[in-house]
Amino acid sequence: MPIKIIQVTDLHLIKPGELLCGLDPLDRLQKCIEDINTHHGDAAMVIFSGDLSDTGEEETYHTLASELEKLVVPYRLMLGNHDNRDAFLKVFTSVMAEDGFIQTVIPMREGRLILLDSLETGKTEGRLDGARLAWLKQQLDAAGSEPVYIFTHHPPFPIHIPHLDSIGLIEADELFALLKENGNVRHIFAGHAHRPVAGSWRGIPISVLRGTNHQTALGFEGHRVAVTHEPPVYGVIFIDHETVIVHAHDFLDRSATYY
Ligand SMILES: [Fe+2]
């Protein structure tokens, strides 16, 4: 049996009742959690891959914490460029920062999930400075020959949408050097782009998902950003020793009809 992981990304919570890009991020999160509880209570883990908050305000993390009480699956939280590490840690007091960062390793039957913290306070682009790269190297060394699955808010690879490529992960080459040295990295799961993207980067399979609130319009020219109301998704990921499969589930769609 493969293990099942759920990926939820780019929640962008604001004050309850307020709209962001014409949408209600809290309502979206509630529907997302409801759907996970209904259909994926058997999942091993839900990973929230950053931009939990839109504003980084402490209140938004309190909102998140109270919604997470309803989630029946164990979860881990990651940070994105919209988050505020200090405010997050004030609310999620049980989260242990490693070297001051919200980075962690989750040992699983099928290998190790390594969750990175690419937030650089005050910046939109992602960073993995010397301390974070050193931590990652330690974790990759400790993984030995076990398969490794990387979760990162900022994609280290270009997706050819100019605005997004300009705010990706700065230390992409340094990250790749460590992943290549390890040689057992099976997949990179990312957020940040608010787009469904799949492919490979220098030989490593990658995937990116839409967020739970607003999305980025598909456009390959110019640096202007357009936001869309394309449907939100969460990812249903199956991992076994041979395969990584990522399904993007449109959790607001109720049109399934059985014939
Ligand atoms: Fe985002």
Image (spheres, rainbow, N blue to C red):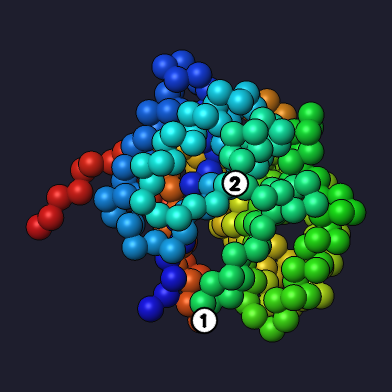
Q: Is residue 189 visible?
A: yes
Residue 67 figure quarter: top left
Asked whether residue 159 appears in the rendered view, the answer is no
Horizontally, residue 160 falls left or right of residue 66, namely right
Q: Which mark is residue 212?
A: none
**Could you tell me which residue is drawn at 50 percent across and 19 percent down?**
15
Q: Is disc 1 placed on a helix, strand or loop?
A: loop
User: Which residue type does callout 2 highlight?
Assistant: Ser
**Residue nearer the viewer, 254 or 140:** 140
Left or right: residue 254 versus residue 52 is left
Q: Residue at x 61, y 41 (%)?
A: 93
Q: Earlier in the sequence, mark 1 or mark 2?
A: 2
Q: In this orientation, which residue lies closer to the viewer: 61 or 222?
A: 61
Q: Residue furthest top?
A: 18
Q: Which residue is label 1 attached to?
A: 241
Can you say whether 85 is above or below 238 in the image?
above
Query: Residue 193's spot in the image, x, y percent?
Result: 61, 41
**SS label for mark 2:** loop
The quadrant the N terminus occupies is: bottom left
Residue extending farthest right: 130
Residue 190 vs 185, above or below: the answer is: above
10 Å crowding of disc 2: few (<14), some (14-19), many (20+): few
Who's the residue at 45% across and 20% down the image? 16
Q: Residue at x 42, y 75 (%)?
A: 2
- Determine which of the numbered discs, if any, sits on residue 94 in the image: 2
In this view, 81 is above or below 236: above
Residue 58 appears at what percent x and percent y? 61, 25
Viewport quadrant of the C terminus: bottom left
